[in-house]
Amino acid sequence: MKIIRPATPMFFNSDVSIGEEIEQAKLWKDAQRCSEKRSRKLFSEWLDEMRPPEKKNEVTAEMIERAKEFPIENMLEVVRGVARCISGEHEDKRPSMQVKHNRVKCFSCGYKNDTIGVAQTIYGISFHEAVKKLQ
Ligand SMILES: [Zn+2]
């Protein structure tokens, strides 16, 4: 199957939001993976390099990866692998949110998230702001 690639990635369009950019970048990344089998890391580095200067201070794939590696214990009080649930859906007198592999999962309400989502929930900030905060 021959994949036709656009001359420039669609996400360079300045009218799209960061969420749409990420979706478009993912689609484009998939196409790239099929057509050339480049490693994901190389491709995200290439994407970052290709960003126009006015977008250099925006969130990059590398920043997202780094944010996901931010120690989740720095945001939550974790005792023996569990923390109080942060979903706000219920009281959590006996902590029921498991903390494992830098992700959380509440066995009471089903809330689950990674570091970026946890930062969004705790601080009430956007995905974009959370990624920047967790560098
Ligand atoms: Zn919960």
Image (spheres, rainbow, N blue to C red):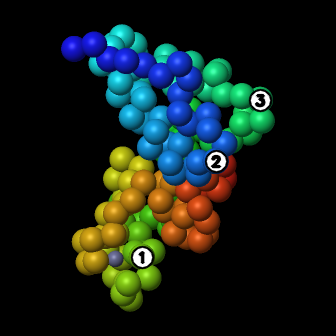
Using the rendered image of the protein, determine whether residue 125 is visible from the camera's viewpoint: yes
- Per the model, the C-alpha gap separating discs 1 and 3 is 38 Å
Up/down of 54 relative to 123, above or below:
above
Dot 3, how many residues are within 10 Å of its Cα: few (below 14), some (14-19), or many (20+)?
A: few
Residue 27, how many percent across, how many down? 39, 34
Label located before the other in sequence (2 or 3): 2
Residue 89, how many percent across, how many down? 38, 84
| Left or right: 84 as drawn, with respect to 109 | right
Mark 2, secondary structure of its residue: loop
Q: Nearer the viewer, mark 2 or mark 3?
A: 2
Using the image as rendered, state which of residue 68 and residue 124 is in the foreground: 124
Using the rendered image of the protein, determine whether residue 66 is visible from the camera's viewpoint: no
Cβ–Cβ below 8 Å for labels 2 and 3?
no
Q: Is mark 2 within 8 Å of ligand 1?
A: no
Query: Residue 54: which quarter of the image?
Result: top right
Q: Which residue is mark 2?
A: 15
Q: Which residue is mark 1?
A: 87
| Left or right: 125 as drawn, with respect to 113 | right
Give the residue at x 48% y 54%: 115
Up/down of 72 relative to 31, above or below:
below
| Left or right: 81 as drawn, with respect to 110 | right
Q: Quadrant of ligand 1?
A: bottom left
Residue 73, how many percent across, how many down? 51, 57
The C terminus, quarter of image: top right
Q: Is mark 1 within 8 Å of ligand 1?
A: yes
